[in-house]
Image (cartoon, rainbow, N blue to C red):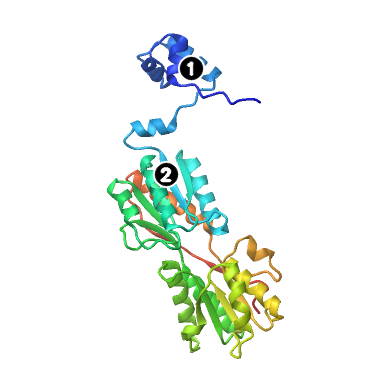
C-alpha cells in the first residue's frame, strides 16, 4: 500500500543543507541578509521537495491571522450553501483563508466551533445561529478577544455586531399579499422557533398582509413547523378539517414541499383548491410537481456582503455596518 510522504519542515530543509532553521526561514521570505546563492539553494530544495508553510503555526506566532471562521447551520440547505459560495469567492479574491464549520442546528456544537476558532486564532467570524441558540456567551467571548463578528440570516440582536439579512418582512408580505389577491381567504403560516429574528420578521410580514386585507388571524393559523417531515405529518388533518385552509405560507421550501406532498396524499388539488408558497428558491422549488412559488433570498449576495463588511472592519475602513438584501417573489405552479 502506498503511504503519503510526510510534509517536510523548515528543520528538515536546514538539516539537509547544513544551515540553521532561522536561515531557512529568512531565505524563504527572501530576506536580503541571506546571500542570493543561499536563498536560491533553499528555494530550489523547498520546491523540489514540495515544501508548504504551516499556516496554523504562522497564525499562532502572529498577533493576527489571515483566516476567517464561518459557521453554517446546515450545508444541505440551498440558501446556506449559496451564502458559503459567496464567502468563498470573495475570500479567494481578497487573499483570505476560511475555516468552515457546520453547527447542525445545535447550540452545543456551535459553542465548540467558536472555541475551536479561538484556538485557531481566526481574525474574524461570519456566523448564522443554530435554531436552538438562545444564549450568546460564546460570541461575547470572541468579541472580548477582539475577534470581529458578522452575523447573517439568523442574527443575534443582543450583541453589538455587524449583520447581513434578507428582507424577510417584505418578502413575506409580498408573498401573502399575492396569495390573497389570487383568491386565498384562509392562509396558514408555518414558522420556525419563535425566538429567531427571521421567524418574527416573516410572521410579521404575514400578519400585516392579512391585516391589510382585513382577514382575521387566530392562533390556530400560526404553527411551529419548519421541516418537510413535520409538514407531512401535520398537514393532512388540517386539510380534512371542517375549516380547511385554502393557502399555506411556509418559512422555507423544504416545509412547502412537505405541504405539497401532504396535499397529494389526501387528494387536494394544488393550486385549484389550495395555494402554497415557500421561502428560499433553491433546487427543491424547481423539482416539485407543480413547481413551487417561493421568495428568492439571493444567498450568494448575502455571503459576499458579509465577507465585505467583515474585511472592511478588519482593515479599518469606515463603511455602512449592516446590509439588507432585497427579496423577490417567484411565481410558479403552486399558486394561481
Circle 2: is it few (<14), some (14-19), or many (20+) Cα within 10 Å? many
Question: What residue would you read off at disc 2?
Answer: 68
In which quadrant of the rendered image does the N terminus lie? top right
Question: Residue 112 got which mark?
Answer: none
Question: Which residue is pictured at 50% across the width and 77% down the height?
Answer: 223
**CB within 8 Å, label 1 to label 2:** no
Question: What residue would you read off at disc 1?
Answer: 43
In which quadrant of the rendered image does the C terminus lie? bottom right
Residue 245: x and y in percent read 59, 84
Question: Which residue is pictured at 64% across the width and 77% down the height?
Answer: 335
Residue 294: x and y in percent read 59, 69
Answer above or below: position of 180 versus 59: below
The answer to whether residue 321 is visible is: no
Answer above or below: position of 313 versus 218: above
State which mark lies toward you, 1 or 2: 2
Question: Which residue is pictured at 44% across the width and 12% down the height?
Answer: 15
The answer to whether residue 27 is visible is: yes
Answer above or below: position of 261 versus 282: below
Circle 1: is it few (<14), some (14-19), or many (20+) Cα within 10 Å? some
The local secondary structure at tag 2 comes to: strand
Amino acid at each position: 500500500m502506498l503511504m503519503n510522504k510526510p510534509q517536510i519542515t523548515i528543520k528538515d530543509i536546514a538539516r539537509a543543507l547544513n544551515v540553521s532553521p532561522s536561515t531557512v526561514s529568512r531565505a524563504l521570505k527572501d530576506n536580503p541578509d541571506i546571500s542570493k546563492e543561499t536563498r536560491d539553494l533553499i528555494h530550489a530544495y523547498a520546491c523540489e521537495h514540495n515544501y508548504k508553510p504551516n499556516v496554523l503555526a504562522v497564525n499562532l506566532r502572529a498577533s493576527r491571522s489571515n483566516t476567517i471562521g464561518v459557521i453554517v447551520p446546515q450545508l444541505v440547505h440551498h440558501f446556506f450553501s449559496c451564502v458559503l459560495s459567496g464567502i468563498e469567492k470573495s475570500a479567494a479574491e481578497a487573499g483570505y483563508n476560511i475555516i468552515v464549520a457546520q453547527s447542525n442546528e445545535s447550540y452545543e456544537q456551535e459553542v465548540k466551533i467558536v472555541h475551536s476558532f479561538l484556538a485557531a486564532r481566526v481574525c474574524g467570524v461570519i456566523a448564522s445561529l443554530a435554531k436552538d441558540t438562545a444564549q450568546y456567551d460564546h460570541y461575547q467571548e470572541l468579541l472580548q478577544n477582539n475577534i470581529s463578528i458578522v452575523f447573517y440570516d439568523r442574527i443575534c440582536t443582543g450583541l453589538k455586531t455587524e449583520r447581513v439579512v434578507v428582507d424577510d418582512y417584505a418578502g413575506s408580505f409580498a408573498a401573502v399579499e399575492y396569495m390573497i389577491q389570487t383568491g386565498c381567504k384562509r392562509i396558514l403560516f408555518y414558522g420556525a422557533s419563535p425566538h429567531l429574528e427571521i421567524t418574527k420578521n416573516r410572521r410579521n410580514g404575514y400578519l400585516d398582509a392579512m391585516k391589510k386585507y382585513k382577514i382575521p388571524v387566530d392562533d390556530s393559523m400560526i404553527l411551529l413547523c419548519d421541516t418537510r417531515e413535520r409538514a407531512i405529518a401535520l398537514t393532512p388533518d388540517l386539510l380534512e378539517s371542517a375549516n380547511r385552509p385554502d393557502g399555506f405560507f411556509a418559512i422555507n421550501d423544504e416545509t412547502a414541499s412537505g405541504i405539497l406532498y401532504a396535499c397529494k396524499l389526501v387528494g387536494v388539488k394544488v393550486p385549484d383548491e389550495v395555494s402554497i408558497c415557500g421561502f428560499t428558491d433553491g433546487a427543491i422549488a424547481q423539482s416539485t410537481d407543480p413547481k413551487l412559488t417561493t421568495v428568492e433570498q439571493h444567498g450568494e449576495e448575502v455571503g459576499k456582503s458579509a465577507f465585505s463588511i467583515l474585511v472592511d472592519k478588519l482593515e479599518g475602513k469606515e463603511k455602512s455596518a449592516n446590509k439588507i438584501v432585497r427579496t423577490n417573489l417567484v411565481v410558479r405552479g403552486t399558486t394561481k
